[in-house]
């Protein structure tokens, strides 16, 4: 059974993952309202991924004698000038989650709670991958450009990327 301190920290992480999922869902609407279905697809997908992370922590906590719950979420950021700002915010959200996961792993180690410590390993590696893929995306968006005349191509680029990811 997890100690009450670690349980509390798992619930904090559940809230962060839920907040990221909630933020990406808002960003999907931002894109759809600007007729960018490909980029919206990317954010729908990212939202789904975060929900999966949240559920994985949620179920783990409940099976280890804890009580999982999603605490109240704040409002996601809603103002973005362009697609680049969406991606910079995405990177910021991912970096926040990475830092929190690393702290949680550190706390498990300090408390000698080695089962959750190992359970969290895949989250640590997943965060590294997520940050790298957002950085790659920022680099390609910089190259393509976010001006009105580039948006058709940029949107198609995202659409292809999401389709490729779905195919595995
Ligand atoms: Fe996540």
Image: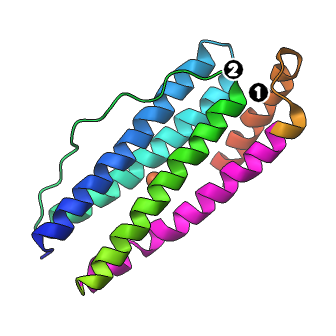
Q: Residue 90 carries which label?
A: none
Q: Is the magenta stretch mostly helix, strand or loop?
A: helix
Q: Name the spot of residue 41 as percent of width and height, x first.
A: 61, 31
Q: Name the spot of residue 25 as percent of width and height, x first.
A: 47, 30
Quarter in which the C terminus is drawn: bottom right
Quarter in which the N terminus is drawn: bottom left
Q: Name the residue under label 1.
A: 155
Does ligand 1 reach within 8 Å of label 2's beta carbon?
no
Q: Residue at x 74, y 35 (%)?
A: 158
User: How far separated are the C-alphas under marks 1 and 2?
Assistant: 6 Å
Q: Residue at x 46, y 33 (%)?
A: 23
Decide if residue 154 is on the left or right side of residue 102: right
Decide if residue 142 is on the left or right side of residue 125: right
Quarter-of-image position of residue 32: top right
Sort mark 1 into few (<14), some (14-19) or many (20+) by Cα contacts within 10 Å: many
Q: Which of 122 and 98 is in front in this view?
A: 98
Q: Does the magenta stretch include residue 4?
A: no
Which type of secondary structure does the marked residue at label 2 adopt? loop
Sort mark 2 into few (<14), some (14-19) or many (20+) by Cα contacts within 10 Å: many
Q: Which region of the structure is painted magenta? A: 113-141
Pointer 1 with pointer 2, Cβ within 8 A:
yes
């Amino acid at each position: 059974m997890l100690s009450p301190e670690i349980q509390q920290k798992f619930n904090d992480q559940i809230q962060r993952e839920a907040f990221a999922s909630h933020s990406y869902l808002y960003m999907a609407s931002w894109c759809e309202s600007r007729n960018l279905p490909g980029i919206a697809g990317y954010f729908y997908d990212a939202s789904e991924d975060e929900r999966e992370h949240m559920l994985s922590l949620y179920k783990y906590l409940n099976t280890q004698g804890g009580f999982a719950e999603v605490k109240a979420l704040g409002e996601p950021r809603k103002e973005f000038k362009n697609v680049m700002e969406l991606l910079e915010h995405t990177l910021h959200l991912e970096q926040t989650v990475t830092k929190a996961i690393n702290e949680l792993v550190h706390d498990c180690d300090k408390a000698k709670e080695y089962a959750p410590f190992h359970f969290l390993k895949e989250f640590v590696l997943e965060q590294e991958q997520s940050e790298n893929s957002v950085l790659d995306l920022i680099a390609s968006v910089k190259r393509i450009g976010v001006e009105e005349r580039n948006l058709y191509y940029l949107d198609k680029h995202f659409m292809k990327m999401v389709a490729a990811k779905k195919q595995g």
